[in-house]
Amino acid sequence: MIHSSIRPLIIAFGFMLGVSGMPLSLSAEEPVASKKSINDVIKLPGVQIDAKNRIVDVEAQISLEDGLLELIACTEGTKEHEAVVRINATPIHVHTALLLIGARNGTPAMRKPINEEKTRWMHVPPSGDPVHVSLVIKDEDGNPVERPISDFIRRTEGDPYMPDYGDGGEPADDDEAKESFPDVFAFTGSHLVEGKDGKKQYLADQSGHVITISTFGDEMLGLPDIQSRENGELVWELDPTYLPPLDTKVTLRLQPKAR
């Protein structure tokens, strides 16, 4: 019988093996998991897992100095011009790390036909366990300081696509203008698809959509509702108040919330 503390490791590493196309088989003679206790710190490439405190830390760098945002985090060489940070890990490893500490993924937002002719469609909102997102940065003395991701994001004032954007004007005082950015995202889990070679592929590994503000449909973590990615509807921008310089190494911290 498999010990309950080992079971999450088997499930999670089995998930990785299945994605890579390698067969997963366990027998009495084969080791089923690392000998490390589930309470130890576990490491994957670019990822550190504190299982006892249910925290996943991901190595990252600041990827943007100012501008509108579609993502919180992306992979290198994808959408750094629209993301707060780029990560040094593979999204499937981050997904696995969240599974290891007990988070359950759902699905990204999608469209489903509501008639046989597929002429009418309905939007299905994203689902998945809530995950708190923050950045750990170093202060002037080199000490780590954790700040919620909302400290780095603000709602745009005025229309960023008009020539006079940023010239001031009277601030709006309605509820929408006062809205603050959320710190909790849904663990949507992207999608597994069949690749050309017959092996399973994790879509977020291909697109770089690690944590998104806009809804793309293949994100690993996303906001718990549907957000347009059309230029005229982007309403969040980088807030430089606490932002370290471009390319500064930081830690992207993910912590599932109690269900």
Image (cartoon, rainbow, N blue to C red):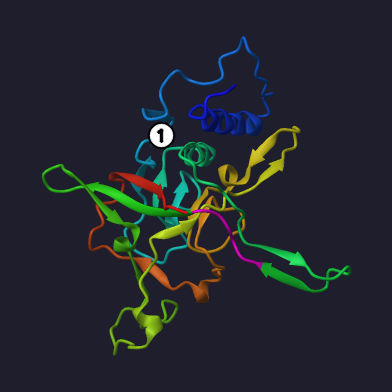
The boundaries of the magenta stretch are 124-129
Q: Residue 126 magenta-drawn?
A: yes
**Whether residue 113 is situated above or below residue 62 in the rendered picture:** below
User: Badge 1, how many Cα within 10 Å: few under 14, some, many 20+?
Assistant: some
**Whether residue 94 is situated above or below residue 13 in the rendered picture:** below
Q: Is residue 26 left or right of residue 135?
A: right
Q: Is residue 158 visible?
A: no
The image position of residue 160, as x and y in percent, is 41, 76
Q: Residue, x 35% and y 72% (percent of image)? A: 180
Q: Is residue 196 visible?
A: yes
The image position of residue 181, as x and y in percent, is 38, 68
Q: Residue, x 47% and y 20% (percent of image)? A: 34
The image position of residue 235, as x and y in percent, is 44, 73
Q: Residue, x 56% and y 28% (percent of image)? A: 10
Q: Residue furthest left?
A: 141
Q: Main SS type for the magenta part?
A: loop
Would you name the residue on which mark 1 appears? 46
Q: Is residue 206 left or right of residue 174?
A: right
Q: Residue, x 56% and y 70% (percent of image)? A: 228
Amino acid of disc 1: Gly
The image position of residue 183, as x and y in percent, is 38, 61
- Dot 1: what SS? loop
**Whether residue 45 is situated above or below residue 228 in the rendered picture:** above
Q: Residue 95 magenta-drawn?
A: no
